[in-house]
């Protein structure tokens, strides 16, 4: 279940939402600020981790 970033068309609020299932007319994303169903999903930045000489892996040591 991905977390997406949305912006409300009506009040311009930006918020994150854990999305279960598909987004559409049957399952709209509602703005928590004003209650509008007129929201748009934003393109969010993606971060990643690359292990290396200074980073190692994510496994706990010990």
Image (cartoon, rainbow, N blue to C red):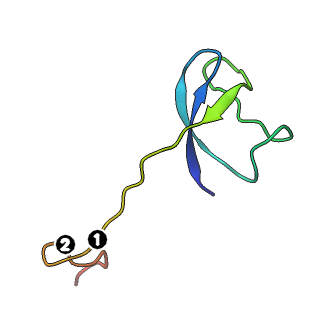
The residue tagged 1 is 50
Marks 1 and 2 close (CB-CB < 8 Å)? yes
Q: Position of residue 56 (x, y in %)?
A: 21, 78
* Closer to us: 9 or 20: 9
Residue 37 lies in what quarter of the image? top right
Q: CA distance from mark 1 to mark 2?
A: 8 Å
Mark 1 residue crowding within 10 angstroms, few (<14) / some (14–19) / many (20+)? few
Quarter of the image that includes the C terminus = bottom left
| Quarter of the rendering containing residue 28 | top right
Look at the picture and state if 49 lies above or below 21.
below
Residue extending farthest to the front is 43
Rendering coords of residue 58 (x, y %): 30, 74
Q: Secondary structure at mark 2?
A: loop
Dot 2 surroundings within 10 Å: few (below 14), some, or many (20 or more)? few
Q: Residue at x 37, y 56 (%)?
A: 47
Q: Residue 10, relative to residue 18: is it above or below?
A: above
Left or right: where 62 falls relative to 31: left
> What quarter of the picture does the N terminus occupy?
bottom right
Front residue of 36 and 44? 44
Q: Residue at x 25, y 75 (%)?
A: 51
Residue occupied by mark 2: 55
Q: Secondary structure at mark 1?
A: loop
């Amino acid at each position: 279940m991905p977390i997406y970033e949305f912006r409300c068309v009506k009040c311009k609020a930006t918020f994150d939402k854990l999305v279960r299932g598909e987004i559409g007319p049957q399952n709209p994303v509602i703005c928590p600020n004003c209650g509008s169903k007129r929201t748009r999903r934003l393109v969010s930045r993606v971060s990643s981790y690359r292990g290396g000489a200074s980073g190692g892996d994510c496994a706990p040591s010990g």
